[in-house]
Image: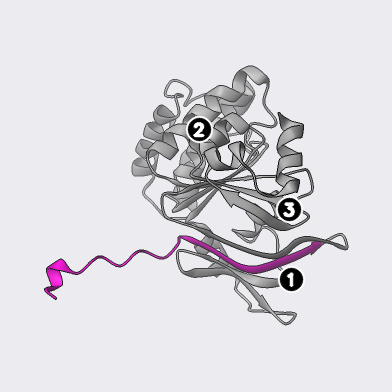
C-alpha cells in the first residue's frame, strides 16, 4: 500500500489507569480501577459520597499514593506500585511530570498576597523558567479568556468565589497542561456563581481540552461530558455517554444514585 494511503494509527489514550488500588484510613477507597481517557475527551466522574471519585482524580497526579497499580499520563508513569514496593520517582522528577497536569480544587488555593495576574504568571516563571514578560502577557490573555480581563490587579480578597475559581482555572491553564482535572470546582460557590465557572469549563470542552471532572452538576455532565463514569465503593460500576446513562442506566446502584439526585 502506498504510504500516503495508509490509515493514521490511533493515538494512545492520554490517561491510562490500570488496576489502581488505594487504602485510606484502613478503608479500600480504590479497588482495581481501570480507566482510559482519550485525547480531547471530557470524562465526568459521578457517584455517592465516599465512592472514590476524588481519590481517583488525585491519584492521576500522585496527590494520593496507590497501594498497587499504575497511572500513565501521555505515556509517562505518574505512579506505579507492584507487590507492595513502589517504583521510586524523585520529587524533582515527579514535579516535572506534574507540569502537564492542571488541577483545579474545590477551594481556590490562590496566594492571598498576590494579585490575580501574579497568581497566574508565577508558576510558569518559577517552575518552567519562562521569561517574566512573556508569562505576564500570557497571564493577561488567560484572564481575558476566563472573563476577568479587568481583574488582573485585584487580590483574591477583592474577588467573588466564582471569580477566584476562574483565576484558579487560568492559573492551571498557564502551565499549558495536556490534561485538566477538576475536583468539584463549584461545590464551594454560592448558587449564583456556579454558572460562570461552568461556562468557562464548557468553553474548554469546546476547545477539546482533555478534562476529567468530579462534579454533582448533572446538567453540566449531561451537556458537556463525552462519557460519564459512575463509581461506588471504590469501583467503576458503569460507563456510558450521558444520553445513554441518564435514559437507561444498566446498573442497579446507578439507578438508585440517579433517583436520589433527580
Q: What residue is pinned by disc 2?
A: 223
Q: Residue furthest top?
A: 192
Residue 108 position, x and y percent, is 63, 36
- Mark 3 nearby-residue class (10 Å; few <14, some 14–19, many ≥20): many
Q: How far separated are the C-alphas under marks 3 and 1? A: 14 Å
Does 36 sit above or below residue 238? below
Q: How far separated are the C-alphas under marks 3 and 2? A: 23 Å
Classify mark 3: helix, strand or loop: loop
Q: What residue is pinned by disc 1?
A: 67
Classify mark 2: helix, strand or loop: helix
- Which numbered disc, 3 or 2, marks the residue that appears first in the sequence? 3
Q: Which of 44 and 164 is in front in this view?
A: 44
Q: Nearer the viewer, mark 3 or mark 2?
A: 2
- Which numbered disc, 2 or 1, marks the residue that appears first in the sequence? 1
Q: How far separated are the C-alphas under marks 2 and 1? A: 35 Å
The number of numbered discs placed on residues in the rendered structure image is 3
Q: Which of marks 2 and 1 is in front?
A: 2
- Mark 1 nearby-residue class (10 Å; few <14, some 14–19, many ≥20): many
- Which numbered disc, 3 or 1, marks the residue that appears first in the sequence? 3
Classify mark 1: helix, strand or loop: loop
Q: Is residue 11 magenta?
A: yes
- Image quadrant assignment for residue 46: top right
Q: What residue is pinned by disc 3?
A: 52
Q: Does the magenta stretch include residue 140?
A: no
Label 1 near label 3: C-beta < 8 Å?
Answer: no
Tell me if I can see residue 155 in this picture.
no
Residue 168 position, x and y percent, is 55, 37
The magenta segment = 1-23
Amino acid at each position: 500500500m502506498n504510504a500516503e494511503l495508509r490509515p493514521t494509527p490511533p493515538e494512545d489514550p492520554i490517561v491510562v489507569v490500570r488496576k489502581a488500588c488505594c487504602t485510606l484510613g484502613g478503608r479500600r477507597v480504590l479497588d482495581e480501577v481501570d480507566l482510559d481517557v482519550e485525547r480531547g475527551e471530557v470524562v465526568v466522574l459521578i457517584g455517592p459520597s465516599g465512592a472514590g471519585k476524588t481519590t481517583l482524580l488525585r491519584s492521576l497526579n500522585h496527590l494520593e499514593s496507590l497501594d498497587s497499580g499504575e497511572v500513565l499520563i501521555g505515556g509517562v508513569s505518574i505512579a506505579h506500585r507492584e507487590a507492595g514496593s513502589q517504583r521510586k520517582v524523585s520529587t524533582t522528577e515527579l514535579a516535572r511530570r506534574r507540569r502537564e497536569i492542571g488541577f483545579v480544587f474545590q477551594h481556590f488555593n490562590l496566594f492571598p498576597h498576590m494579585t490575580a495576574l501574579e497568581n497566574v504568571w508565577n508558576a510558569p516563571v518559577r517552575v518552567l523558567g519562562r521569561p517574566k514578560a512573556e508569562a505576564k502577557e500570557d497571564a493577561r490573555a488567560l484572564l481575558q479568556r476566563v472573563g476577568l480581563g479587568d481583574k488582573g490587579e485585584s487580590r483574591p480578597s477583592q474577588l467573588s468565589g466564582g471569580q477566584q475559581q476562574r483565576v484558579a482555572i487560568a492559573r492551571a491553564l498557564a502551565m499549558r497542561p495536556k490534561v485538566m482535572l477538576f475536583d468539584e470546582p463549584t461545590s464551594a460557590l454560592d448558587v449564583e456563581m456556579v454558572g460562570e465557572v461552568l461556562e468557562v469549563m464548557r468553553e474548554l470542552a469546546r476547545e477539546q481540552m482533555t478534562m476529567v471532572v468530579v462534579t454533582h452538576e448533572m446538567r453540566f455532565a449531561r451537556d458537556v461530558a463525552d462519557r460519564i463514569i459512575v463509581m461506588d465503593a471504590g469501583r467503576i460500576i458503569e460507563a456510558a455517554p450521558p444520553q445513554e446513562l441518564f435514559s437507561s442506566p444498566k446498573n442497579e446502584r446507578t439507578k438508585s444514585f440517579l433517583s436520589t439526585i433527580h
